[in-house]
Image (cartoon, rainbow, N blue to C red):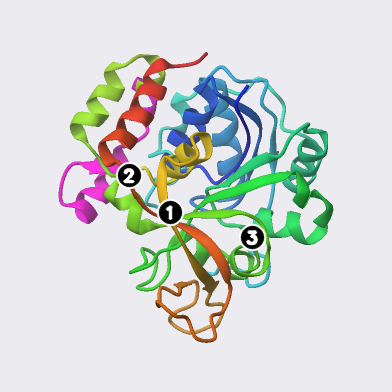
Amino acid sequence: MGTKLIIDTDPGVDDAFAISLAAVSPDVELLGVTTVFGNVPLTSTTANARRLLQLCDRPDVPVAAGAARPLVHANDRGSRTVHGTDGLSGRAGTLPAATRPLESLDAVGLMVSLLEAADEPVTIAPIGPLTNIAALLAAHPGVRSKIARIVLMGGAIMRGNTTAAAEFNVWADPEAAHRVLAEEDLPTVVVPLDLTHRCAVDSAWLAKLAASGPLGHTLEGLTPAYVAHYRQVLGFEGMVMHDAVAVAEAISPGLLRTETYPVTVDTTSGPARGMTVVDRRAVPAHAVGRPVEIATDTDLDGLREFVLSRLAGGPR
């Protein structure tokens, strides 16, 4: 059937695009969706994920709630409002109510169940803080053999977006990110801010999405708060669909071009906390972390068309 996929998410407008991209793609077997705190608190990310799957006519996909806070240090700065107070520009109520109950298992329990039942390795796409993934790998090391690769949105090479040094998903739980990125030995692709910003879409792209059908119209309707934020960042009317870029690579391996570098995460309490340290020296001396694939380039127009054409196709 194509890529077997689990998405771990904190919806979020860009998460909404990413979940929908996977849910409507005929070459994806979306096994489950797990939720984590992040763009908004866990109760909202969980409700948003369930409603998004209902929008995509995918009540067959189970949803389980995961971590409501970071592994070690509580995040006293709270959630951001880039995505609006409900994570979807204040428009979560425009989505249909979910008909499938929330799973009684938590996020880690659902992932273990799905991985153990899978007849071939599964791709995991974490597009929020990495708390659930770190907990999964720490508590259930036996499932590693069932994971084909991890394709995550997070980190930054040059500069952050939450602090000068740190990207939000990594900053939200640096200890979890350090475990997943620097300590585990699994094939991992990191899709950083440096590339996702280059994949930004403009108002013309969003207009095409809105005109494409019911799914596209509803998704575009979730973007006002997000577009207002990115109007300042980008200098034009548009948005960065960070998480959808990572899910596109999870669906279609090789869509993004990658380079392999040693990576670690700053877990100190100083101004670099949450920084993704990518060692790009030609001959690393005393390299820390482990080698991971960093997505550095893609056919930008091709990527935008890939996402648009899939979303325009609507529910299966």
Q: Position of residue 90 (x, y in %)?
A: 40, 38
Q: Position of residue 87 (x, y in %)?
A: 46, 43
Is 236 on the left or on the right of 182, as rendered? left
Q: Position of residue 236 (x, y in %)?
A: 15, 46
For the point 46% across and 43% down, the residue is 12
Q: Which residue is mark 3?
A: 69
Identify residue type, mark 3: Arg
Q: Position of residue 13 (x, y in %)?
A: 41, 40
Q: Quadrant of residue 193?
A: bottom left
Q: What stretch of residues is rendered in magenta?
A: 217-240
Residue 130: numbered disc: none
Identify residue type, mark 1: Thr
- Residue at far front of view: 283
**Residues tagged 3 and 2 counted as in contact (Cβ below 8 A):** no
- Cα–Cα gap, marks 3 and 1: 31 Å
Quick one: label 3 or label 1, which is nearer the N terminus? Answer: 3
Q: Which residue is mark 2?
A: 226
Q: Is residue 115 above or below residue 273?
A: above
For the point 38% across and 71% down, the residue is 163
Quick one: label 3 or label 2, which is nearer the N terminus? Answer: 3
Residue 258: numbered disc: 1
Identify residue type, mark 2: Tyr
